[in-house]
């Protein structure tokens, strides 16, 4: 599926697990993921793997269909979209069953609802991008970023960190220094 969506060369971006506790899980306002880790060609997408059923009662995902075509939008406080233009109540609910995977581009306007139930929805959000889609800024630095999951990373030697490690005798500290080698 990733190859169909992103092309033959796909790399992993930092991922996370989301858990919304019963009767306490707060809503998350409308936003795009773009401001958190902007990339040049906007191929970044999320694959949200649901471990539990999620519906409107326990805080499922809501999206604005087709909103990824709007491109990056101006954000308000904390990278959320203007609540007058994109109210918390807007969007289309995406109820899911345990085992479902929802794919969406990081430009898709989305939010999650409040958990008003006694059920805990959990999902793991894996984020991927085309290997040749470079970040515009150093955001969300993570040693796992750039791990090739399909094909090759043709830009690896241009984007990997360059350093050397030197050992200085037994029991002494190791020294890490930038390297001038590409």
Image (spheres, rainbow, N blue to C red):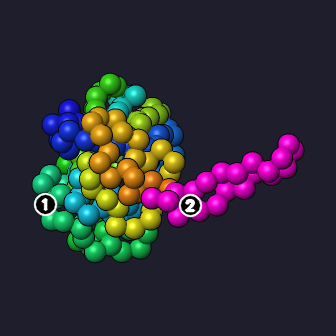
Q: In the image, residue 113 lies at what x, y percent?
A: 36, 49
Which quarter of the rendered picture does the C terminus lie within? bottom left
Q: Which residue does the image show at 50% across and 56% down from the upper left?
A: 161
Q: Is residue 24 above or below residue 3?
A: below
Q: In the image, residue 122 lies at what x, y percent?
A: 44, 35
Q: Residues within 10 Å of mark 1 (few under 14, many from 20)?
A: few
What secondary structure is marked by label 2? loop
Q: Is residue 142 above or below residue 78?
A: above
- Start-end of magenta stretch: 162-182
Which quarter of the rendered picture does the N terminus lie within? top left
50 in the magenta segment = no
What secondary structure is marked by label 1? helix
Q: Residues within 10 Å of mark 2 (few under 14, many from 20)?
A: few
Q: Which residue does the image show at 41% across and 36% down from the upper left?
A: 123
- Viewer-closest of 43 and 177: 177
**Gap in Å between the C-alphas at discs 1 and 2?**
41 Å
Q: What residue is disc 1 on?
A: 69
Q: In this view, does 82 lie to the left or right of 3?
A: right
């Amino acid at each position: 599926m990733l190859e169909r969506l992103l092309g033959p060369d796909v790399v992993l971006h930092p991922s996370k697990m989301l858990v919304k506790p019963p009767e306490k899980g707060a809503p998350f306002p409308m936003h795009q993921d773009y401001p958190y880790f902007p990339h040049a060609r906007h191929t970044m997408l999320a694959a949200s793997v649901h471990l539990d059923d999620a519906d409107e009662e326990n805080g499922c995902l809501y999206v604005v269909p087709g909103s990824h075509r709007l491109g990056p939008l101006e954000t308000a406080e904390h990278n959320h979209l203007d609540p007058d233009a994109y109210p918390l109540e807007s969007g289309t609910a995406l109820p899911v069953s345990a085992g479902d995977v929802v794919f969406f581009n990081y430009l898709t306007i989305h939010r999650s609802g409040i958990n008003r139930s006694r059920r805990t929805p959990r999902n793991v959000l894996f984020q991927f991008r085309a290997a040749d889609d470079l970040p515009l800024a150093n955001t969300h630095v993570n040693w796992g970023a750039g791990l090739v999951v399909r094909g090759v990373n043709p830009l690896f030697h241009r984007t990997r960190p360059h350093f050397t490690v030197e050992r200085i005798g037994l029991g002494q500290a190791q020294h890490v220094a930038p390297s001038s080698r590409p």
